[in-house]
Image (cartoon, rainbow, N blue to C red):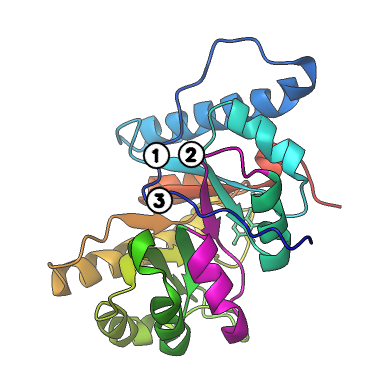
Amino acid sequence: MSDQQPPAVPDTCRNNSPLTDSPLPDKSRSVQDSIVAARVRLERALADAGRAPDDAWLLAVGKKKPPAVLEKAFEAGQRHFGENYLQEALEKQVALNHLTSICWHYIGAIQSNKTRDIAEHFDWVHTVDRIKIARRLSDARPADRGPLNICLQVNISHEPAKAGVEPEALEALAREVLKLPGLRLRGLMALPAPSDDPTAQRRPFADMKALLRTLSERHPEAVLDTLSMGMSGDLEAAVAEGATVVRLGTALFGSRS
Ligand SMILES: *Cc1c(COP(=O)(O)O)cnc(C)c1O
């Protein structure tokens, strides 16, 4: 990448914009259609769960998709974008520098030597699972950007070698994270073991909801308003169990080769 720095991102992220009626160029049509379809799908899932239409929002996951594709989603009103790979994300941030109200979420594995770039160039991090990383992110967060929004990733399906704090260790981690001035703990994130069975899909999400409730009760001083869970294949199950952010890649941008 060039020596140009990725842009500073505004420290308050706006909501995804309402859908526009304005005609978009033909090439934008299919991404726009996917955004509309995903919003309809999310609203239906919320209604089925007896929840309000604005109770959850979409995070567009752009890994391996070029900036031009993300820009089409932006033109359709999408504001929250998630990235898994730091270098790829920083290059996209430079390419999309002109989109001033975009909000960047880091949702990938965090190596400790990458914490400075992550703390400087993102608004949210969904994948914090150990105190060492949390401290480094807090220390590296520029003061003028305000605290970095954090979700703690939980290994809710108890998969060996999978990222995420074990549920039993969550409370101790949260207690330490809440002391860090550069971070604002917002809630929990999960990436459960995949399943095609809607009933089986719901169990880990229900466990996540219970963990967040317990954490909120123990820490009334914190505003734990976020459950980041649900992807293209299990959005409905996640929303039924209280997801507030669903992370969609394939459903918006097609499969990744
Ligand atoms: C890729 C990815 C997603 C999106 O997955 P899809 O199944 O393509 O919707 C969501 N969350 C994380 C952490 C991811 O890595």
Residue 241, label in figure? none
Write the start and end of the magenta stretch as one range: 96-122
Q: Position of residue 174 (x, y in %)?
A: 30, 79
Residue 101, label in figure? 2
Amino acid type at circle 2 is: Ser
Q: Which residue is mark 1?
A: 14
Amino acid type at circle 1 is: Arg
Q: Is residue 244 left or right of residue 109?
A: left
Q: Position of residue 252 (x, y in %)?
A: 67, 37
Residue 190 visible within the image: no
Q: Disc 2 vs disc 1: Cβ atoms closer than 8 Å?
A: yes
Mark 2 neighbour density, 10 Å: few (under 14) some (14–19) many (20 or more): some
Q: Where on the picture, by quarter, is residue 166?
A: bottom left
Secondary structure of the residue carrying numbered label 1: loop
Q: Position of residue 250 (x, y in %)?
A: 70, 45
The residue drawn where x is 73% and y is 23% is 28
